[in-house]
Image (cartoon, grey):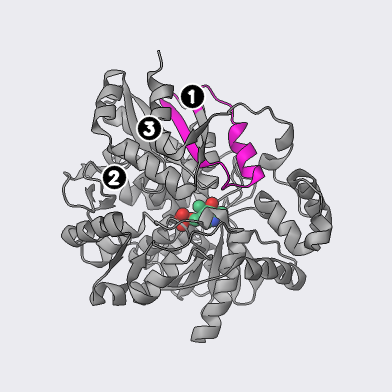
């Protein structure tokens, strides 16, 4: 099966090319040319499989230029062994009789990004072999926090690759920052940006669009690629856990085979929830995809009105991985929902770029609303939800997941829908321990304490263990100290790659 660009101006390519390129040459995103349908029988057969087997059976329908053996190896390298500290990789935990939590944070960096970024480097190395690539692949990443560490962990010392990560210096938690700047590996670079995530992302996009630079790099044997969630190789492994969660619930007898359920997803760049949309399109019985936003509620407004407008105040919230005003993966959804009208996508994306806003047509707006529902939760609601959920259910939520739980409550209140719902839990509560501890212990309980003392306090208070990836973080040496201005990201890339 081949992949085409949402902008309609690049030739269709196989998945190995699409994964190697990341973004299409015309600036669009790659989407599969054919519809993949998973039958009820196939769905039923997943119940008896392990997570890695489930992954192979989904991935093989999309990555048809990979052999079964290659896919099995990719999946084993990513999710096998003891890389994930939970049996089943992405376990489903019951919260109430009509709600479960899908824990996507059992990977090495304690955030859901590991689900995709442990396997992307595996895909990429094989994609390079398949396409006869001899250049070194340079992964450029702009991160709001979690992607950076997960990409660094996935790519560290992977042969034929190197990775450069840009993060907003003031926009990530202390734990996130230390996770990145202490990263080991001969091929890794980490640089702080004086600006917010959108500044970092715009800077990186500009580097990708710089034709002169790419020629100079090509001469030196480098080729740029992306590990941001616009890469199809990152999106496709995320489809797996929607199926896996469903299979687990059927297996446990919590839901009937064929019964529709809702998924609630704390959303930023729209990658996670878009994978849910693809799962639904493949035939997974999904009623609604509930898009949970924080105070940066550009997606809530879009889903409610069909008008996307990034011209608004940017808030730094307690759920920083969702502090995003340009949700790149929305482009793929619009392409699919308009029946693949590249001219419309070009028009809207140009308007987004020049004016910061666009409005979709009535038909597209109705289709969006048929699949999605959205609301947002502010920081106060986030903290209250963490506290309430702990007190009522003895379950510890991180700030992002708390946003989703709150929005699920709003959804049920607004619609009266009683459909069984699964909340995607995107980070370990220990990853955002400062806020989680504040929610449970109050301002007095955390006064004067470092994030690292709070890790211990939180563990002692709840009896939950500190995940391996976060232990002793403050005692590891800082290996990356570089900082750059937001308009000098290209210069930083040149300095790293072209310095004699
Ligand atoms: C990345 C991230 C999100 C947002 O996911 P998208 O795929 O960008 O929508 C939510 N929560 C956490 C903890 C994340 O790391």
Mark 1 or 3, closer to the camera: 3
* Residue 306 in view here: yes
* Residue 66 in view here: no
Q: Which residues are magenta?
A: 159-188
Q: Position of residue 48 (x, y in %)?
A: 51, 58
Label 1: which secondary element: loop
Asked if 452 appears above or below 265 in the picture, the reply is above
Q: Residue at x 39, y 51 (%)?
A: 235
Camera-side residue of 215 and 11? 215
Mark 2 or 3, closer to the camera: 3
Q: Residue at x 60, y 44 (%)?
A: 84
User: Tag 1: Cα neighbours inside 10 Å, few (<14), some, or many (≥20)?
Assistant: some
Quarter of the image containing the C terminus? top left
Per the model, the C-alpha gap separating discs 1 and 2 is: 30 Å
Camera-side residue of 78 and 71? 78
Label 2: which secondary element: loop
Per the model, the C-alpha gap separating discs 1 and 3 is: 18 Å
Residue 187 bears which disc, if any? 1
Q: Position of residue 181 (x, y in %)?
A: 60, 33
Residue at image mark 3: 490
Residue 64 bears which disc, if any? 2
Q: Quadrant of residue 346?
A: bottom left
Mark 1 or 2, closer to the camera: 1
Asked if 134 appears above or below 201 in the picture, the reply is above
Q: Residue at x 35, y 66 (%)?
A: 308
Q: Is residue 152 magenta?
A: no
- The answer to whether the beta carbon of the residue marked 2 is less than 8 Å from any atom of ligand 1 is no
Q: Position of residue 344 (x, y in %)?
A: 19, 62
């Amino acid at each position: 099966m081949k992949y085409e660009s949402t902008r309609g101006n690049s030739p269709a390519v196989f998945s190995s090319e699409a994964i190697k390129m990341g973004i299409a040459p015309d600036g669009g995103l790659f989407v599969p040319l054919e519809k993949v349908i998973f039958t009820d029988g196939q769905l039923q057969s997943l119940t008896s499989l392990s997570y890695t087997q489930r992954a192979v059976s989904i991935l093989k329908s999309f990555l048809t230029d990979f052999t079964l053996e290659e896919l099995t190896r990719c999946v084993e390298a990513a999710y096998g062994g003891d890389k994930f500290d939970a049996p089943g990789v992405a376990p489903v935990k019951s919260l109430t009789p009509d709600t479960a939590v899908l824990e996507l944070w059992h990977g090495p960096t304690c955030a859901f990004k590991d689900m995709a970024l442990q396997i992307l480097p595996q895909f990429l190395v094989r994609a390079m072999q398949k396409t006869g690539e001899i250049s070194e692949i340079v992964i450029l990443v702009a991160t709001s926090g979690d992607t950076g560490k997960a990409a660094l962990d996935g790519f560290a010392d992977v042969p034929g690759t190197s990775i450069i990560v840009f993060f907003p210096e003031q926009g990530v938690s202390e734990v996130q920052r230390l996770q990145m700047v202490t990263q080991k590996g001969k091929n890794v670079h980490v640089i702080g940006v004086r600006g917010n995530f959108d500044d970092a992302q715009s800077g990186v996009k500009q580097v990708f669009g710089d034709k002169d630079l790419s020629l100079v790099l090509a001469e030196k044997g480098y080729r740029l690629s992306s590990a941001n969630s616009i890469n199809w190789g990152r999106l496709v492994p995320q489809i797996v856990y929607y199926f896996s969660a469903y299979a687990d619930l059927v297996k446990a007898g919590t839901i009937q085979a064929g019964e529709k359920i809702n998924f609630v997803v704390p959303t930023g760049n729209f990658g996670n929830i878009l994978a849910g949309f693809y799962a639904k399109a493949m035939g997974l019985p999904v009623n609604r995809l509930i898009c949970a936003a924080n105070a940066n509620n550009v997606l809530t407004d879009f889903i409610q009105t069909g008008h996307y407008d990034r011209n608004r105040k940017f808030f730094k919230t307690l759920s920083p991985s969702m502090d995003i005003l340009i949700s790149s993966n929305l482009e793929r959804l619009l392409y699919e929902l308009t029946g693949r009208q590249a001219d419309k996508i070009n028009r809207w994306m140009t308007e987004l770029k020049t004016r910061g806003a666009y409005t979709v047509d009535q038909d597209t707006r109705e289709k969006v609303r048929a699949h999605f529902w959205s609301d947002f939760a502010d920081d106060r609601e986030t903290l209250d939800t963490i506290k309430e959920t702990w007190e009522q259910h003895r379950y510890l939520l991180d700030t992002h997941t708390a946003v989703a739980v709150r929005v699920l409550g709003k959804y049920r209140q607004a619609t009266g829908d009683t459909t069984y719902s699964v909340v995607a839990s995107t980070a370990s509560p220990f990853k955002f321990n400062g806020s989680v501890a504040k929610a449970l212990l109050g301002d007095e309980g955390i006064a004067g304490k470092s994030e690292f003392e709070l890790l211990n306090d939180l563990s002692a208070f709840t009896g939950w263990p500190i995940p391996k990836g976060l232990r002793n973080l403050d005692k590891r040496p800082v290996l990356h100290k570089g900082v750059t201005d937001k308009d000098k990201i290209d210069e930083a890339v040149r300095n790293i790659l072209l310095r004699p």
